[in-house]
Amino acid sequence: SALGYQMLNHEALINSWAENEPILTFRSEAVNLSATIEADDNTYRFVKTDAVVEWDRSTDEISTLLELTDFFDPYVYQPGDAQTGYATIKCGGEPDAEDWSHANSISLDADGNLIVGIRNLNAVAAFRVPWGSKRRFSNESSAELLWIVSNNSAWSNFTFDDDSSKFCMAHHVRARTDVTAPNQVFLTMFDNGDSRPECNFMADPHQPDMHC
């Protein structure tokens, strides 16, 4: 059940692949889990989840493209010890909700696939979504998970050449191509880096000199 916390946030991307060019964004909602989970040395019964939605500006309707919990189980996909500064959501007099996914960026690659940045899971995921009008009006998700890249090797489809190459709590993930490497796809992002083991300013915000 929902806690009454719900909002559209972070991204506002025009989807040129769909009819009427709707706006892609996230809808966040705090929900009650069937059992508790552990994070940041705390126990939570509620988590804030994210869905990718689109707003049709011609009809002022919002439809859901995919729910992250349909592909990422909060009991399995947990940041663990590598994640610090995990936030909670306040919902009036209700219990705190763990900011579980904190998805924060949506982009489209050259094939029209959704590229979703999921900050608190230190992950980027690609989804194939059919952009026909029939799917949009049905409001039923037909998204297909294509791949995940994450600094957690347990659920990443890719590996890093070195631990120093891993991204942490990234923002603004974008897929791009390069004419010098036509068969490759590159991801660019802002790497916040503030959950790296050497960056402990979340535990001590008064540290004067951090280079992360």
Image (cartoon, grey):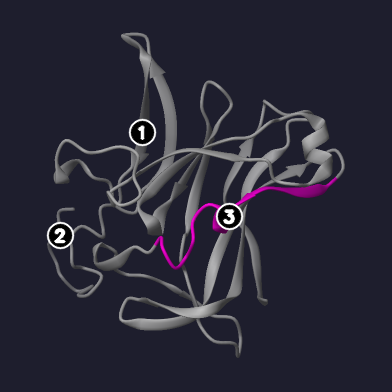
Mark 2 or 3, nearer chain start: 3
The quarter holding residue 48 reads bottom right
Look at mark 1 in the image and give the residue it sits on.
188
At 24% from the left and 67% from the top, the residue drawn is 81
Residue 106 relative to residue 179: left or right: right
**Which of the two residues, 44 or 104, is positioned nearer the viewer here?**
44
At 78% from the left and 39% from the top, the residue drawn is 136
| Residue 35 lies in the magenta-colored region | no
Contact (Cβ within 8 Å) of mark 1 with mark 3 = no
Which label lies toward us, 2 or 1?
Answer: 1
Total number of numbered labels? 3
Circle 3 residues within 10 Å: few <14, some 14–19, many ≥20 = few
- Indicate which disc residue 70 carries: 3
Q: Which element carries disc 1, helix, strand or loop? A: strand
Which label lies toward us, 2 or 3?
Answer: 3
Q: Quadrant of the N terminus?
A: bottom right
Q: Residue furthest bottom?
A: 93
Q: In the rendered structure, which segment of residues is drawn in magenta?
A: 60-77
Mark 1 or 3, nearer chain start: 3
Which label lies toward us, 1 or 3?
Answer: 3
**Residue 199 image point, x, y percent:** 17, 61
**Residue 131 image point, x, y percent:** 71, 30
Look at mark 2 in the image and give the residue it sits on.
210
